[in-house]
Image (tube, rainbow, N blue to C red):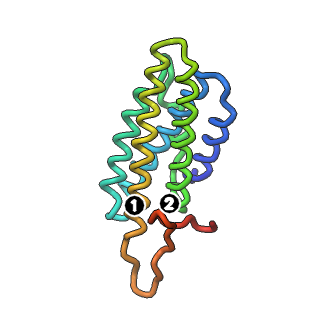
Amino acid sequence: MDAVPLIEITRRALAHSEEAADVVTEAWQAQALAEAVGVHLAMTGPPEVRAQAGGLREASGRACGSLRGPGQRSDGARAAHLTEMSDPLSALHELGDLLGEAGGALVRVAVDAEEEGLYWRCIEGIDAADECGDKVTAILRRLALRPRPVGEGAAPVCEDGLPVREGA
């Protein structure tokens, strides 16, 4: 399955999560997707981003471990269905948005957490979402600086130097 629909499914599930355990599970799903995107780009992406994609894979893999709850199986990740990235720029923009939303949702859970273990899982998840979001932004910037073959125009970029999403 393509990365963008998987990310959209996870964004909807996160938005509809009301219970703390569901929010943490969807934040874990977001990190699993970040890890899968990192793996995919490290193996098949442009050479200019492979090292940074490996960093995304490593950071999100650590985050998955810290967010995984007791009895939660890693084989339940939607990310296991990722087989392609037909539009890497859109996938990275969407992933960055998802990670930001997951971090915000974890903040809300942490504020209301009565259990110390849940609080610290949320704090670790917030830090991880921020770190992985930074890594996604770095990959996008690297893609924007990538040389284009002769005859192709440079990719349009936003004010922040990130490439514009196709169709935006």
Q: Residue at x 51, y 12 (%)?
A: 115
Query: Which of 61/106 is in front?
Result: 106
Position above or below: 57 against 106? below
**Which amino acid does the dot numbered 2 rest on?**
Pro
Mark 1–mark 2 Cα distance, whole angstroms, equals 9 Å
Q: In which quarter of the image is residue 148?
A: bottom left
Q: Which residue is drawn at 38% across and 70% down?
A: 145
The residue labelled by disc 1 is 45
Q: Do the residues labelled 1 and 2 touch (CB within 8 Å)?
A: yes
**Which amino acid does the dot numbered 1 rest on?**
Gly
Sequence-wise first label, 1 or 2: 1
In the rendered image, the residue lying farthest to the left is: 51
What kind of element bears circle 1? Answer: loop
x and y percentages locating residue 165 in the rendered image: 56, 64
x and y percentages locating residue 135 in the rendered image: 39, 49
Query: Which of 167/47 is in front?
Result: 167
x and y percentages locating residue 155 in the rendered image: 48, 74
What kind of element bears circle 2? Answer: helix
Position above or below: 31 against 147? above
The residue labelled by disc 2 is 88
Q: For the C terminus, which image quadrant?
A: bottom right
| Total numbered badges shown on the rendered structure | 2
Q: Which residue is drawn at 63% across and 68% down?
A: 167
